[in-house]
Image: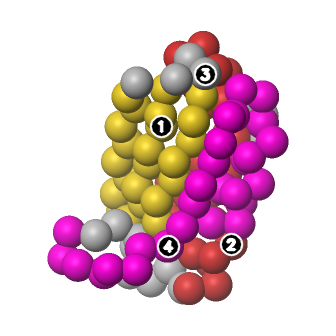
Amino acid sequence: MLTHVVCFKYKPEVSEDVRREHRTRLQGLVGLPGVIGLTVGADRVRSARSYDTGLVVLFPDRAALDGYATHPAHVPVAQFGASLCEHIVAVDFE
């Protein structure tokens, strides 16, 4: 199994409504092919090192992750997130 973790740091001017919209769009990816599980949520600790939103997606293998990354339903969500963020980090591990 492959675990895909993404953390989003929004630009300061991004409103809470838009942040919620982003999380809703991310949650909508749960039904894509190869997705075994998907969790998304807002940071609750708000420490100096915290990011604003976290996404964890479980895939059976690397091929499923690669298919997800280029899926026509994922691409616009990824582009929307990138437009809102000053920084995005990811890690993928087995």
Residue 26 location (% of width, % of height): 66, 56
Disc number lying in front (1 or 2): 1
Q: CA distance from mark 1 to mark 4?
A: 17 Å
Q: Is residue 10 visible?
A: no
Q: What is the secondary structure assignment of the residue under circle 4?
A: strand
Query: 50 left or right of 4?
Result: left
The region drawn magenta spans: 23-49
Distance Cα–Cα, label 1 vs label 3 = 11 Å
Left or right: 54 in relation to 32: left
Q: Is residue 71 visible?
A: yes
Look at label 1 and name its amino acid.
His
Residue topped by disc 1:
4
Compared to residue 58, the image places residue 89 above or below, namely below
Q: CA distance from mark 4 to mark 2?
A: 12 Å
Farthest top residue?
63
Nearest to N terminus: mark 1 or mark 4: 1
**What is the secondary structure assignment of the residue under circle 3?**
loop
Quadrant of image for the C terminus: top left
Q: Amino acid at mark 3?
A: Pro
Residue under numbered circle 2: 21
Q: Which residue is mark 4?
A: 42
Query: Residue placed at 44% from the left, 83% from the top?
Result: 13
Residue 68 drawn in magenta: no
The outermost residue toward the left is 48
Instruction: Please indicate whether residue 61 sits to the left or right of residue 44 in the image.
Output: right
Label whose residue precedes the other's in the sequence (3 or 4) = 4
Closest to the camera, between mark 3 and mark 4, is: 3
Relative to 52, residue 45 above or below: below
**Mark 1 vs 2: CB contact within 8 A:** no
